[in-house]
Amino acid sequence: MLQIDLKGKVAFVAGVGDERGFGWACAKALWQAGATVCVGTWPPMYKIFTGLLESGKLDEARRTPDGSLFEIAKIYPLDAVFDIPADVPAEIQENKRYKELSGYTISEVVSQLHKDFTSLDILVHSLANAKEIQKGLLQTSRQGYLDAISASTYSFVSLLKYFVPIMPQDGAALTLTYIASQATIPGYGGGMSSAKAALESDVRTLAYEAGRQYGIRVNAISAGVWGSRAAKAIGFVDQMVAYTEANAPLARSIQPQDVGHTAAFLLSPLARAITGETLFVDSGMHSMGLALDSKSLD
């Protein structure tokens, strides 16, 4: 039987802070395929997330079909808008949610992981943030727009830049995007649609550069709508889920494991000839040009 086999591989998933997001689903699927999995957690969420794990409150979410519990080898505090310690402003350094932590810039996390595991085979970028996401693009400030690009797009470039020196030639990287990069989604604001479009463009360029220079594959998954805690910030995610169920070819919304399973495939040797690709995992919603539940069709 053909199986995804990631035994002996070390994976790092950036952007895991709870059990409901795509980052968790990707990490869990990679572990089920045999990988040693580490995660990066935003410093303000670090204490909460580690506390939930230690208390056993996430045990049900950790459970796999064979009854075993998904294990995270190490959790690193990570704020991916900072490349090096000198980038961290004084007000962040003194913030109580950061002050008790150290080594949370990208370069420091890579250095520590190198010491802990020697090398990295798999990188997953599950990070996105826009401080003004509920504002239309015309109402988005310059700083809000640049913040969205920094947190959601350049963070992937920087993570790969710092990780490739410790990745083997058959390494693989993956990021998560959304169809707002290619089509208008009213309400998905604050520069996030622009950030996702830039991210997909970067995937193609990084696939070429990382492929030629390091032999590393780079791909993206364009995931359908899911009601994660992060997505709730958009404000209308429940309606978008219902819209998918009414209009997608498969007439159902996606589940996080759909993304996790696809990620495990793309990051495995089974996908050795796939790079520079953005693969939709959205029940086919991206292929539709007509809303079947539109009142105008009545």
Image (spheres, grey):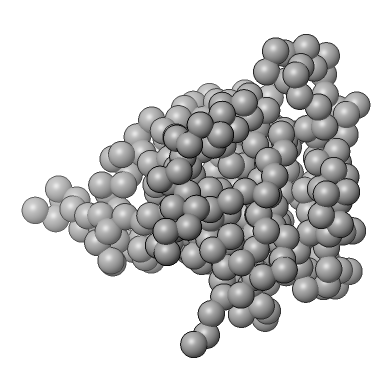
Residue 269, placed above or below residue 28: below
Residue at image x 83%, y 59%? 119
Residue 164: where, in percent of width, then height? Answer: 84, 59
Q: Is residue 160 visible from the viewing direction of this image?
A: yes
Of 109 and 199, which appears nearest the observer?
A: 109
Residue at image x 28%, y 66%? 250
Residue 94: where, in percent of width, then height? Answer: 78, 12
- Of all residues shown, which one is farthest toward the left? 298
Residue 103: where, in percent of width, then height? Answer: 82, 32
Residue at image x 19%, y 51%? 294
Tell me how many marks there are.
0
Residue at image x 44%, y 52%? 63
Of 253 and 8, which appears nearest the observer?
A: 8
Residue 108, placed above or below residue 214: above
Left/right of residue 276 with respect to residue 133 in the rendered view:
right
Left/right of residue 229 with respect to residue 266 in the rendered view:
left
Left/right of residue 22 with respect to residue 274 in the rendered view:
left
